[in-house]
Image (cartoon, rainbow, N blue to C red):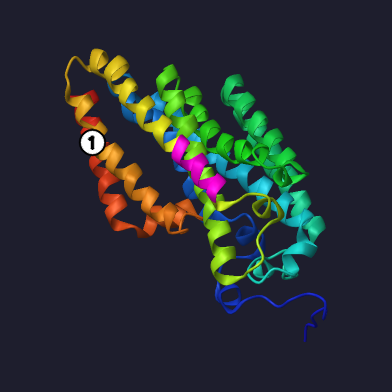
Amino acid sequence: MTTTDPATPSASPSARASRLPAWLRAMRPRQWVKNVLVLAPVVPAGSQVGLDTLTGVAVAFALFCLVSSSIYLINDAKDVDADRAHPRKRFRPIAAGELSVRTAVALAVVLALLAVGGGLAWQPALGTVLVVYFLIQLAYCFGVKHEPVLELACVASGFLLRMLAGGTAGDIPLSGWFLLTTAFGSLFMAAGKRYGEARRGELTGEAVRRVVRKYTTTYLRFVWTLAATVVVTAYALWTVEVLVPQSGTNLASISVVPFILAVLRYAVDVDKGDAEEPEEIALHDRVLLVLALTWCASLLLAVWL
């Protein structure tokens, strides 16, 4: 019969019922949906996309899953004591005592080496993007996450670097307008996450992370409003300045409509404080999903026909 350290919280019923081993759950496979962003550069690439491009993007996706899981393990190992006192995070495998800190760190090192080594072997530029991502997120784990604004930049950079990885691995040229769109779109999502946390703390009285307490909801609203304004403007200019000349048709400009509607719909979720987990919104907001698919379809029609 096994015994449990009284100082270590037991796993949640959902965790005990899961068939996934603790080490795999600690890698947070549900978060891998974020890495689908490496596919973003493929959509406007049009006829430039071939088997080599798709293979490169698939490699970038797999390597980002490894390196991001490495960061999750390091973060959870470092914050294990704080997580054990948290009402939800205490059920994570490391905090719950299902996976030792030493094993988690060892696994994190292996995953990081595999990701960076694989990236450098596939294409040095991809390896560089992975190293930059790892170092930024490592800095985030060891202190930057407590610094207002800087931590927002770190979170936003994670989304942006995923798209850069897709373009780099697939050898797809990325325009300045595209990068501006992705950069401020990333900031929009990052500010929305923090706003969701702040709103949850206000409504439930639940403890929130230290950096969130340093923001006001008014300030976070200003940030995501500013970011949304820039991302819509940059996207419109990208379609007019790049996609229309590239495709030789004005169909690309039509995609601006569903894009703006999708941003506005996502803003509804942000304003309600429901954007703490963007991947959950993507999976459960059906209207947003339809708008996103409509936008993708209109964009594909413009660049592929």
Q: Is disc 1 surrounded by few (<14), some (14 to 19) or many (20+) residues within 10 Å?
A: some
Residue in the picture at 46% in, 24% down: 179
Q: What element carries label 1?
A: helix
Residue 91 location (% of width, % of height): 65, 70
Q: Does the magenta stretch include residue 128?
A: no
Numbered range of the magenta stretch = 218-226
- Of residues 74 and 222, which is closer to you in this image? 222
Residue in the picture at 42% in, 29% down: 181
Q: Residue furthest bottom?
A: 1
**228 left or right of 121 in image:** left
Residue 75 location (% of width, % of height): 72, 51
Q: Residue furthest front?
A: 218
Residue 281 location (% of width, % of height): 41, 55
The quadrant in which the N terminus is found is bottom right
Query: Circle 1 sits on which residue?
Result: 257
Residue 27 location (% of width, % of height): 62, 54
Residue 232, visible in the rendered structure: yes
